[in-house]
Amino acid sequence: MRQEHVHQISHARSASSHQYNLLIALFITGGIMVAEVIGGLLSNSLALLSDAGHMLMDILALLLSFFALRFATRPATEKQTFGFYRLEILAALINGTVLLALSLFIFYEAYQRLIEPQEIKGLLMLGVAAIGLGANIISALVLRAGSHESLNVKGAFLHVVGDLLSSVGVIFGGAIILLTGWKTVDSIISFVIGGIILVGAYRLVMESVHILLESTPKDIRLNEVIDGVKTIEGVRDLHHVHLWTITSGIYALSAHVLIEDQMTSRSSQILENINQFLMERFNIDHTTIQFECEACEMDFVCRLDTAGNPPESQAGK
């Protein structure tokens, strides 16, 4: 219980830090969007206006991530006994789905520009895109560390990276158009950006679905968990094992453990050893262990039978 409480405090602190970073990225992205709308209207740049629309979607995604983290830190209730951790994964799934839709929209727009190239005031477009690139780099750096700890923050990070790539593409394409007049490069760059976003979005969606389906965490091999627990003194076998992820970095396990015939008072030490092993080796700190043992050979020894019945006193016999 103490380890679980410590982990909950640590997770709450991480969530608070992630919320702060998301707010920073949110304000930066909002400022870029306003600048791109103004710049796009003044330069008649469809690329900048499209990127501003991309920014608007990212603002919504960042808001979703922020509020998901806010709710995820709320304590458990009678109806939500695990708390609201899964909101983080749902937000990541929605963000990934939006990114998939966005990549398809970019492909469509790129195709339209191949058919009907647009006149662009390259110099103004480059200036606004350069400002956007600098701001996106700052946002990406702010969210980068949290993206390794939280799938939800990873979704927000991928949105910002998509913005960054868009800014790079706009700058590169604008420079080529300004120097050579070759407008087709705008569509080519858009296809590349859309492809990169599509790959990242697909991975994010699959990771989210993997967790929601309560699959075994990707960085843990179930056979290694079973074999490791069997090496603990007093443990004879392990079965009915279920291992899943509650939210990013929080793993849970339930299992039936067959222990050797012994005084039931010793089972608490075996349970402590199992939990310590699972935490230190696999970072699993939410466990539900049901002990089972075969009938004791001596009548005066208390036993735990395989049906899970309470110990029977033999004192009156």
Image (tube, helix red, strand yellow):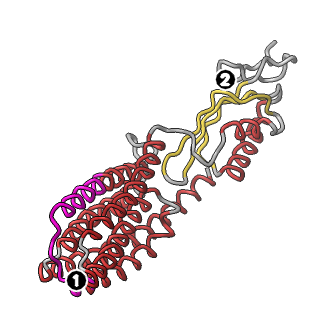
Q: Residue at x 15, y 71 (%)?
A: 118
Q: Residue at x 60, y 39 (%)?
A: 253
Q: Nearer the viewer, mark 2 or mark 1?
A: 1
Q: Nearer the viewer, residue 260 or 46?
A: 46
8 lies left or right of 166 = right
Residue span colored magenta: 101-126
In this view, the residue farthest toward the right is 298
Instruction: Give percent across and percent down for residue 234.
Output: 82, 34
Q: Nearer the viewer, residue 85 or 52?
A: 52
Numbered mark located on residue 186 in the image: none
303 lies left or right of 62 = right
| Circle 1: residue type | Gly
Q: Tell me the CA gap for discs 2 and 1.
A: 79 Å
Which residue does the numbered mark 1 point to in the structure image?
122
Numbered mark located on residue 310 in the image: 2
Contact between marks 2 and 1 (CB within 8 A): the answer is no
Instruction: Give percent across and percent down for residue 61.
Output: 30, 61
Magenta: main secondary structure: helix
- Which image quarter: residue 310? top right
Instruction: Give percent across and percent down for residue 122.
Output: 22, 83
Instruction: Give percent across and percent down for residue 298.
Output: 87, 18
Dot 2 lies on which element? loop
